[in-house]
Image (spheres, rainbow, N blue to C red):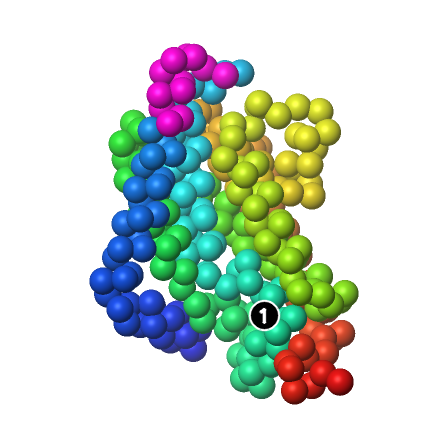
C-alpha cells in the first residue's frame, strides 16, 4: 500500500509539467519507430539471419520496449542506485519503516522511457497474430524480462555499497545488457553466447522470451521464469548485504 502511494507520488512529479511529459514520451516513441523501421527494411532486404526474420525481430523489439519501459521507465531508479549510494542519497530511505530497496525503486519515474512502454504493446499488436496465446506469452515474457533487467541492474549497482566509487559500473552494465538484448539471440556464438546467459543476462530479457513467441516450449518458459526469480533474489540479497557495509557518501560525512 505504501509503495503504491510512493509510485503515485512519482507519477505526480513526472506529470507536474504535462507538456514536457508528453513531449519526452513522444520523442522516445519516434526514436523507437525509427529504429524499428531500420530493422524492418534490413530484414526485407536480406530475408532472415540465422532463422530470425522480420516478424521475429519485431516481436523481440516489442518485448524489449515493454521490458525496458517497465524496468527503466516505471522503476526509474533501477540503474541509478549505485550513483545514489555514492552520493548519500539513499540515507533518508534507511530511516523509513518500509523496505528501502522497494521505496528507492518506486520513488522515481523516468518520463522519457515511458515512450518505450507505450510503443511495446503497439508494436506487438502490429506484428503479432493477435491471438490470446501470443498475448499471454508476450506479457509473461516482457514481465520476466523486466524483472531480470531490474535484478541485474540492482545487483551491479549494489557493488558500490561494497567497494565504494561513483557507481559507474551500473551505467556500464545498463549499456551492455540493452545493446546485447537488441539483437537476435542466435547471431551470437561461442563465449559471447555464454555471457548472454550468465554475466550479462540479455538472453533472458529478450532472446528467450522472443523465441517462445516463435515456438513455445515449456522448458524454455520455465527457464525464463527461473531466471526472473534468480535475478530478483540476487538483487535483493546483494543490496541487503551491501547495506551492512554501507557508509554514507553524503558530503557532510566525508573527512
Residue numbers of the magenta segment: 38-49
Q: Secondary structure at mark 1?
A: helix
Looking at the image, the residue that sits furthest to the left is 19
Tell me where residue 6 sits by quadrant: bottom left
Q: Position of residue 58 (x, y in %)?
A: 38, 29
Position in image of residue 94 (x %, y %): 60, 81
Q: Residue at x 60, y 43 (%)?
A: 176
Is residue 11 shown left or right of residue 75?
A: left
Quarter of the picture containing the N terminus is bottom left
Q: Quadrant of the C terminus?
A: bottom right
- Residue of label 1: 84
Does residue 28 lie above or below 219 as drawn?
below
Question: From the viewer's perspective, is residue 159 above or below residue 66?
Answer: below
Q: Is residue 59 visible?
A: yes
The kind of secondary structure the magenta stretch mainly shows is: helix
Q: What's the residue at 72%, 75% (across, down)?
A: 246
x then y, percent, for residue 103: 50, 73
Q: Residue at x 50, y 16 (%)?
A: 49
Name the residue located 38 percent from the left edge and 37 percent from the top edge: 62
Does residue 151 appear to the left or right of 56 in the view shown? right
- Picture quadrant of residue 31: top left
Residue 42 is inside the magenta segment = yes
| 139 or 33: nearer the viewer | 33
Amino acid at each position: 500500500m505504501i509503495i503504491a502511494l510512493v509510485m503515485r507520488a512519482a507519477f505526480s512529479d513526472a506529470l507536474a509539467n504535462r507538456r514536457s511529459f508528453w513531449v519526452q514520451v513522444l520523442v522516445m516513441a519516434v526514436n523507437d519507430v525509427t529504429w524499428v523501421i531500420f530493422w524492418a527494411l534490413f530484414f526485407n532486404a536480406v530475408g532472415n539471419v540465422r532463422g530470425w526474420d522480420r516478424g521475429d525481430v519485431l516481436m523481440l523489439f516489442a518485448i524489449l520496449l515493454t521490458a525496458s519501459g517497465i524496468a527503466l521507465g516505471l522503476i526509474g531508479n533501477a540503474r541509478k542506485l549505485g550513483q545514489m549510494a555514492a552520493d548519500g542519497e539513499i540515507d533518508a530511505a534507511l530511516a523509513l519503516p518500509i523496505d528501502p530497496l522497494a521505496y528507492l525503486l518506486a520513488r522515481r519515474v523516468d518520463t522519457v522511457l515511458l515512450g518505450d512502454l507505450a510503443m511495446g504493446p503497439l508494436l506487438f499488436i502490429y506484428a503479432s497474430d493477435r491471438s490470446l496465446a501470443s498475448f499471454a506469452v508476450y506479457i509473461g515474457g516482457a514481465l520476466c524480462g523486466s524483472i531480470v533487467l531490474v535484478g541485474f541492474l540492482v545487483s551491479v549497482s549494489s557493488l558500490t555499497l561494497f567497494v565504494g566509487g561513483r557507481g559507474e559500473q551500473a551505467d556500464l552494465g545498463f549499456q551492455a545488457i540493452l545493446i546485447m538484448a537488441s539483437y537476435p539471440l542466435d547471431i551470437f556464438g561461442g563465449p559471447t553466447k555464454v555471457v548472454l546467459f550468465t554475466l550479462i543476462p540479455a538472453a533472458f530479457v529478450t532472446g528467450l522470451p522472443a523465441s517462445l513467441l516463435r515456438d513455445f516450449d515449456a522448458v524454455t518458459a520455465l527457464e525464463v521464469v527461473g531466471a526472473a526469480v534468480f535475478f530478483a533474489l540476487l538483487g535483493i540479497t546483494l543490496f541487503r548485504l551491501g547495506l551492512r557495509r554501507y557508509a554514507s557518501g553524503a558530503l557532510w560525512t566525508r573527512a
